[in-house]
Amino acid sequence: MERHLQAFPFWTQLSAKEQAAIRGCAYVRRYAAGSLIYAREQECLGLMQVLSGTVRSFMLSEEGRKVLLYRIAAGDCDVLSASCVLKKIEFQTQMVADTDCELLIVPAVCLAGLKTENVHLRCFLYEKLGERFSEVMLRMEQMLFTRIDQRLAQVLRRRADASGRVRATHEALAAEISSSREVVSRVLKRMEADGLVRLGRGSVTLLRGAPSAGCRGKTD
């Protein structure tokens, strides 16, 4: 625990009393892949550091559609689940364990008082919040201005193993690019007809190298 806490950039700028307060409230929790970590209807979680595994953050529409915002991996921190301790900041996200993961959490109730007294902690929270907003804005820009087939091709190239195989269902790929399974299936079938990919059960294999930015036919 002490080693993980000392990894926070602001740790050495805390007083002995402030360090003791965080030690007394911080805890480590493990989540199995697919487990819900944080939802908008729950109480504010707090500052979160990923010790192992990967966490996915997304927004959920009233119709149940998931819009992926970003992922955080081992060594990364997240403060959106602690945004309730920052004045006039409200960001409704949900977080799920992408893989089995282990998280170090400093509860929001612990941060609330400390960030008021310590400018270094407060600056760290706002700096990380700014980084997350930048990631979310980039994601929104891609959704609005990049074609579905281009976004799907980017994901396939990124997730392909050495043999060019991507182990993912159409539904998982749809969640990755914030689209629907039906649209992804149509685009993949066009890619297969163009000889760019070969579709299998729960997998997509890239042919002739990674698919380019697009495929023939109308773009969804």
Image (tube, rainbow, N blue to C red):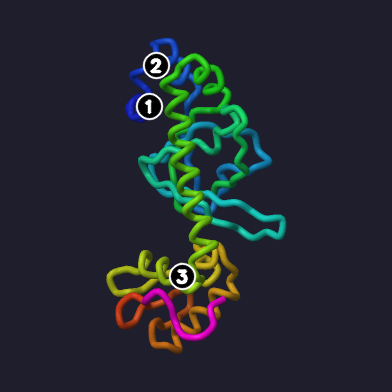
Q: Is residue 176 left or right of residue 3?
A: right
2 and 208: which is toward the camera? 208
The tag on residue 152 is 3
Q: Label 1, on which residue?
A: 5
The residue lying toward the viewer, choosing from 165 and 60, is 60
Marks 2 and 1: which is nearer the front?
A: 2
Q: Main secondary structure of the magenta part?
A: loop
Q: Amino acid at mark 3?
A: Leu
In magenta segment, residue 213? yes
Going 46% across and 67% down the picture, which residue do you hit? 151
Q: Residue at x 29, y 74 (%)?
A: 163
Most distant residue in the front direction: 145
Q: Residue furthest left?
A: 162
Q: Quadrant of the N terminus?
A: top left
Mark closer to the chain start, 3 or 2 = 2
Measuring from the top left, give residue 153's x and y in whole percent.
42, 72
The answer to whether mark 3 and mark 2 are in CB contact below 8 A is: no
**Residue 176 pos. (x, y %):** 50, 62
Quadrant where the C terminus is found in the figure: bottom right
Q: Name the N-terminal-most of marks 2 and 1.
A: 1
Residue 133: mark in rendering: none
Q: Earlier in the sequence, mark 3 or mark 1?
A: 1
* Amino acid type assigned to the residue bearing label 1 in the image: Leu
Label 1 element class: helix
Q: Residues within 10 Å of mark 3 (few under 14, many from 20)?
A: many
Mark 3 → mark 2, Cα distance in angstroms: 45 Å
Q: What residue is shown at x 44% (from left), y 74% (from top)?
A: 203
Element carrying mark 2: loop
Residue 81, x across and y down, in percent? 55, 37
- Residue position marked by numbered label 2 in the rendering: 14
In the image, which residues are magenta? 212-220
